[in-house]
């Protein structure tokens, strides 16, 4: 990685804004976590890559769903009216009433 040198100012609350060039170099964004490691008079900043939490019950449910889809069981077509509404508004988040 190329060397980047930049300055940040500490606020009265002890906070700093991580400069954009550093955020970009580390590949971090809002909500991401970074680690500070103090060595003598230097601070090493690294990003923390968290493993995503995986819920075993969701994994089991998705596995059952996948088996149903592969075998064709419990799989039906969407009602035509619902499919038409969904196709008419791609990318929009809305509630659609489904006939039962």
Image (tube, grey):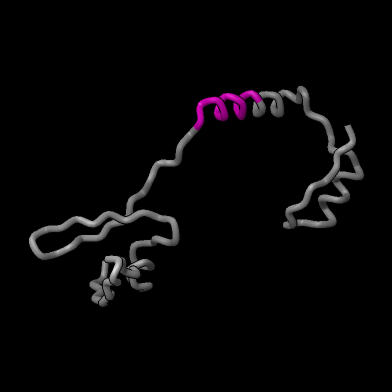
From the top left corner, tell me how far across and down residue 42 is, in percent. Answer: 14, 64
- Please tell me which residue is depicted at 33% across the width and 51% down the height of the picture: 48
Most extreme residue toward the left is: 40
From the top left corner, tell me how far across and down residue 38 is, in percent. Answer: 15, 58
22 with respect to 87 (left or right): left
- Please tell me which residue is depicted at 71% across the width and 29% down the height of the picture: 69
From the top left corner, tell me how far across and down residue 47 is, in percent. Answer: 32, 55
Most extreme residue toward the front is: 12
49 with respect to 79 (left or right): left
Q: Decide which of 63, 46 is in the foreground and name it.
A: 46
Q: Decide which of 68, 39 is in the foreground and name it.
A: 39
- Please tell me which residue is depicted at 26% across the width and 71% down the height of the picture: 2
- Quadrant location of the C terminus? top right
65 with respect to 34 (left or right): right
- Picture quarter containing residue 92? bottom right
93 with respect to 29 (left or right): right
Whether 13 is among the magenta residues is no
Vertical position of residue 46 compared to residue 78: above or below: below
Give the tally of numbered discs: 0
- The magenta-colored residue range is 55-64
- Please tell me which residue is depicted at 85% across the width and 56% down the height of the picture: 88
């Amino acid at each position: 990685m190329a060397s980047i040198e930049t300055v940040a100012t500490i606020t009265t609350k002890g906070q700093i804004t991580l400069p954009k060039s550093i955020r970009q170099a580390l590949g971090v964004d809002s909500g991401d976590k970074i680690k500070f490691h103090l060595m003598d008079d230097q601070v090493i900043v690294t990003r923390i890559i968290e493993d995503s939490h995986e819920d075993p019950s969701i994994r089991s449910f998705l596995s059952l769903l996948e088996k149903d889809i592969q075998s064709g069981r419990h799989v039906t077509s969407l009602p035509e009216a619902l499919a038409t509404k969904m196709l008419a508004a791609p990318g929009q988040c809305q509630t659609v009433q489904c006939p039962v």
